[in-house]
Image (cartoon, rainbow, N blue to C red):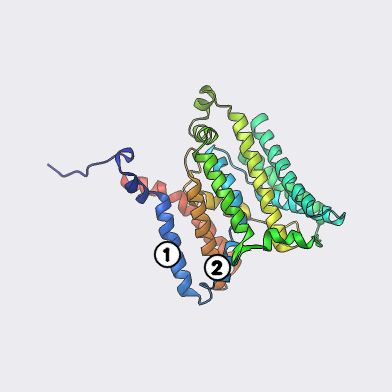
């Protein structure tokens, strides 16, 4: 008689054992390893202000990744988020030319984000179009409007107090952006993991037809998620424009890949139905540490893009390879 390893279902394992075997625990180990590697690779890495600057590498993208996680868990996706940033930033820049003050600029940034999110949501939930096709189209549409308005020019002259959103510090080396991201992460975690709305998101991602027959208003939930993605893109546009102090139509170009990579690296299934906000937050730190460490080593941006692309492919492929290996 051959010995066989006794299989214990996840629900019968202790909470500690489940946590230790979770994807989030693995990500924490990766984050620690990257942190240690960076500290040895560059003598400037452990400087408090440098570590603070490292947060700017991911906070704006991570804000959108929070909403993108909910959207992907529901079985949808929004590839237009970076273009929404460009359009919102362009709208704020145009408003500055007419003397609009900081509160007005904030409202414009949030408003443009919500309008773009509502447009995507309408096309997907009312017209019944595939979200990946819709948002590829609006990705070109929104950024194209920015190029029409600006061409190769730039908007400048933002009010001095507007700079606080992207350059201000709440306490010592802790930036306003980082605090805002932490607050938004807690809100999204509560929304997804502690409310009926979050349970509906999981149900839709696992079985949209079953969710519909169980009484969940699938179209309304998905529309709200697209609104949320647009709103978070508007918030990111405010922070990024404030940090840069200017607007160009190429702003946030290529961010879609990095945002989706954060979400998938965080353990959210690209097929929908599973994932956690904690995983996305840890993944954001991992990607921020990786890109900041490469930057300190003067690694070219194109190499960083290759690393991010390879990371995305690896994260998607590894679970399938693991299942194949286990047979």
Q: Is residue 87 above or below residue 288?
A: above
Check whether the beta carbons of the residues at disc 1 and disc 2 lie within 8 A of each other: no
Label 1 belongs to which residue? 33
Give residue 162's position: percent from left, percent from top: 75, 59
Spatial CA distance of label 1 from label 2 is 16 Å
Residue under the point 61% across and 54% down = 180
What residue occupies the far bottom of the structure in this picture?
A: 43
Judged left or right of residue 233, residue 299 is left
Judged left or right of residue 85, residue 185 is left
Label 2 belongs to which residue? 51
Residue 49: which disc? none
Q: Is residue 250 above or below residue 198?
A: below
Residue under the point 52% across and 32% down = 196
Element under label 2? helix
Element under label 1? helix
Foreground of the two, 288 or 80: 288
What residue occupies the far front of the structure in this picture?
A: 171
Judged left or right of residue 57, residue 286 is left
Give residue 293's position: percent from left, percent from top: 53, 68
Q: Quadrant of the C terminus?
A: top left
Give residue 246's position: percent from left, percent from top: 76, 61
Q: Quadrant of the N terminus?
A: top left
Callout in the foreground (1, 2): 2
Category of crowding for the residue at label 1, using alpha-carbon neighbours closer than 10 angstroms: few (below 14), some (14–19), many (at least 20): few
Please indicate, yes or no, whether residue 257 appears anywhere in the rendered image: no
Give residue 29's position: percent from left, percent from top: 40, 59
Residue under the point 70% across and 37% down = 118
Category of crowding for the residue at label 2, using alpha-carbon neighbours closer than 10 angstroms: few (below 14), some (14–19), many (at least 20): some
Q: Quadrant of residue 323?
A: top left
Foreground of the two, 150 or 111: 111
What residue occupies the far right of the structure in this picture?
A: 98
Task: State the count of labels.
Answer: 2
């Amino acid at each position: 008689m051959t010995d066989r390893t006794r299989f214990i279902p996840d629900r019968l394992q202790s909470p500690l054992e489940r946590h230790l075997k979770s994807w989030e625990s693995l990500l924490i180990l990766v984050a620690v390893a990257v942190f240690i590697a960076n500290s040895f690779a560059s003598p400037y890495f452990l400087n408090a202000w440098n570590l603070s600057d490292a947060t700017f590498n991911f906070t704006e993208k991570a804000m959108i990744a929070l909403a993108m996680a909910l959207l992907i868990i529901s079985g949808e996706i929004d590839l237009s988020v970076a273009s929404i940033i460009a359009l919102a930033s362009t709208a704020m820049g145009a408003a500055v030319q007419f003397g609009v003050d900081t509160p007005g600029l904030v409202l414009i940034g949030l408003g443009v984000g919500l309008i773009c999110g509502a447009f995507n949501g309408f096309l997907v939930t009312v017209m019944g179009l595939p979200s990946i096709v819709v948002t590829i189209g609006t990705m070109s549409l929104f950024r194209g409007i920015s190029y029409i308005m600006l061409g190769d020019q730039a908007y400048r002259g933002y009010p001095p107090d507007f700079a606080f959103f992207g350059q201000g510090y709440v306490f010592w080396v802790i930036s306003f952006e980082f605090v805002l991201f932490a607050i938004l992460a807690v809100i999204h975690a509560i929304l997804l993991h502690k409310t009926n709305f979050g349970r509906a998101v999981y149900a839709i991602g696992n079985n949209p037809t079953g969710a519909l027959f169980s009484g969940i208003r699938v179209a309304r939930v998905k529309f709200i998620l697209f609104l949320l993605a647009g709103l978070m893109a508007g918030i990111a546009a405010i922070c990024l424009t404030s940090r840069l102090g200017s607007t160009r139509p190429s702003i946030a170009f290529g961010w879609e890949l990095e945002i989706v990579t954060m979400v998938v690296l965080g353990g959210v299934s690209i097929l929908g139905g599973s994932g956690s906000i904690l995983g996305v937050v840890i993944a954001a730190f991992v990607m921020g540490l990786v890109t900041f460490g490469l930057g300190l080593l003067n690694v070219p941006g194109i190499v960083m893009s290759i690393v991010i692309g390879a990371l995305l492919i690896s994260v998607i492929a590894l679970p399938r390879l693991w299942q194949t290996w286990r047979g």
